[in-house]
Image: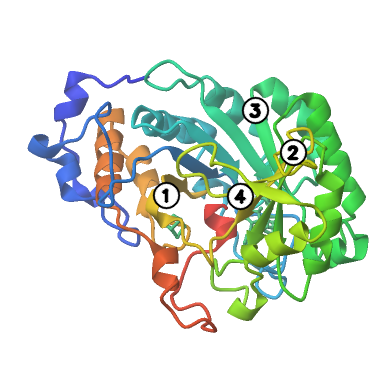
Amino acid sequence: MNTMTDRDTHRVIPLMDVRPHGLAVPAAAFSSGTRLLTGGLLADTRGRSLRDLRISVTDRCNFRCNYCMPKEIFGTDYPYLKHADLLSFEEVTRLARVFVAHGVQKIRLTGGEPLLRKNLEQLIEQLSKLRTPDGQPLDLTLTTNGSLLARKARALKDAGLQRVTVSLDGLDDAVFRSMNDVDFPVADVLEGIAAARAAGLGPIKINMVVKRGTNEQEILPMARYFKGSGLVLRFIEYMDVGATNGWRMNEVMPSAEVIQLIQSELPLVPLEPSSPGETASRWGYADAQGRHDPAAGEIGVISSVTQAFCGECNRARLSTEGQLYLCLFASKGYDLRSLVRGQASDADLASAIGHIWQSRNDNYSEQRSHLPFDSGTPVKRVEMSYIGG
Ligand code: SAM
Ligand code: SF4
Ligand code: SF4
């Protein structure tokens, strides 16, 4: 839905609206001869279109997963964003509407822990009303650690959320409690998953980050537990996101090894990707004839470290305070909040977002694949809890 007027498309707003510490929105976005409207084919410098928007609704979390928000850094005195700095639900929805007019079909709410954001259902209700230019509803989903799901699943569904992805790094209670580092029991997450199922928030995906030396012994128990459940378990390679998790390559268990391990007990067959730009490679459980058995279901592996998938990356990320990041590994974002809180019209926002996307050339994972195998994190990056996974 596009509410832009003629007046909007000709107004010029000063570049000073862009915050100095964010990246500058390309000047062409605001000059009358080079303004970009929605409705055209928007592609970045590598020919990738904009399809997927991840919105972080809070930088706070009630877990302290050591690969994401280690306690030593994210202690009680950590300077989280103040409420006034967060985009309001109306601001998020306004930006989302412009992204959707540019081709976004899928929105994922994330964080930090998105269910900690007060009244999140109100945002979901607003986003669920958006329609793509050809009148289709969005694929609206959310990634959560599951801790508050038992309480909130029904309200989320009623507000218009379609499905959820729940993070779960193991079934062994001691392993799980030590990975979330706040002694949170695995049983409560399983209860949350059951509540999401009962509320009809499906298909549900389960994300397990595999860290070598920490939870690789949980791979097979997790595969056995979720096989045939209708839930899709996905194994994620431990990534060098942010600058605080002390990432080393030798703690990454390559997806190829995960598949090999599962195959040793539960035969698998490769499946076709279900959509372009999909991050996970899909594998189906095989029947006695070696064909995919749909009743047994499938798993996925997300090989962000060992197999770069930048070539089809169609994802943009909107941080909690309204900065637009073009890559999970970017060190800076474009300050859309100052445009939204300034005098920018929807058409100004559309032109800014269009120009930013057109200038995108990020391919961090491809670049990293050329670095020495045992190197640490090579550049300063923003934390995943801030821009969302
Ligand atoms: N708190 C929510 C959760 O944990 O699902 C949403 C935000 S979290 C940043 C999103 C996803 O990123 C989770 O599935 C989490 O496991 C994953 N993640 C965080 N740090 C990671 C890392 N260093 N490597 C791989 N995945 C990571
Ligand atoms: Fe919190 Fe999710 Fe990060 Fe764990 S992965 S610390 S649950 S934001
Ligand atoms: Fe996309 Fe950046 Fe990840 Fe490549 S490294 S797949 S560009 S988010």
Q: Which residue is mark 3?
A: 161
Which mark, by number, is residue 111? 4
Tell me which corner region of the image, top left, top right, bottom left or bottom right, holds residue 124. top right
- The numbered mark, 2 or 4, whose residue comes first in the sequence reads 4
Q: CA distance from mark 2 to mark 4?
A: 29 Å
- Counting labels gives 4
- Which badge, 1 or 3, comes first in the chain's sequence? 3
Categorize mark 3 by other alpha carbons within 10 Å: few (<14), some (14-19), many (20+).
many
Is the residue at mark 1 in contact range of ligand 3, meaning its CB lies under 8 Å from it?
A: yes
> The N terminus lies in which quarter of the figure?
top left
First reached walking from the N terminus: tag 2 or tag 1: 2
Amino acid found under the numbered disc labelled 1: Cys
Image marks 2 and 4: residues in contact by CB distance under 8 Å: no
Q: SS at mark 3?
A: loop
Estimate the x, y position of residue 274 in percent, counting from the top left: 54, 37
Could you give the CA–CA distance between mark 2 and mark 3, rounded to whole angstroms? 23 Å
Report whether the residue tagged 3 is closer than 8 Å to ligand 1: no
Q: Which residue is found at the position 58% from the left and 66% from the top?
A: 239
Residue drawn where x is 70% and y is 75% of the image: 72
Tell whether circle 4 marks a residue whose Cβ is less than 8 angstroms from ligand 1: yes
Viewer-nearest residue: 114 or 308: 308
Residue at numbered disc 2:
297
In front: mark 4 or mark 1?
1
Asked if labels 3 and 4 touch by Cβ distance under 8 angstroms, the answer is: no
Q: CA distance from mark 1 to mark 3?
A: 24 Å
Amino acid at pointer 3? Leu
CB of mark 2 near ligand 1 (< 8 Å): no
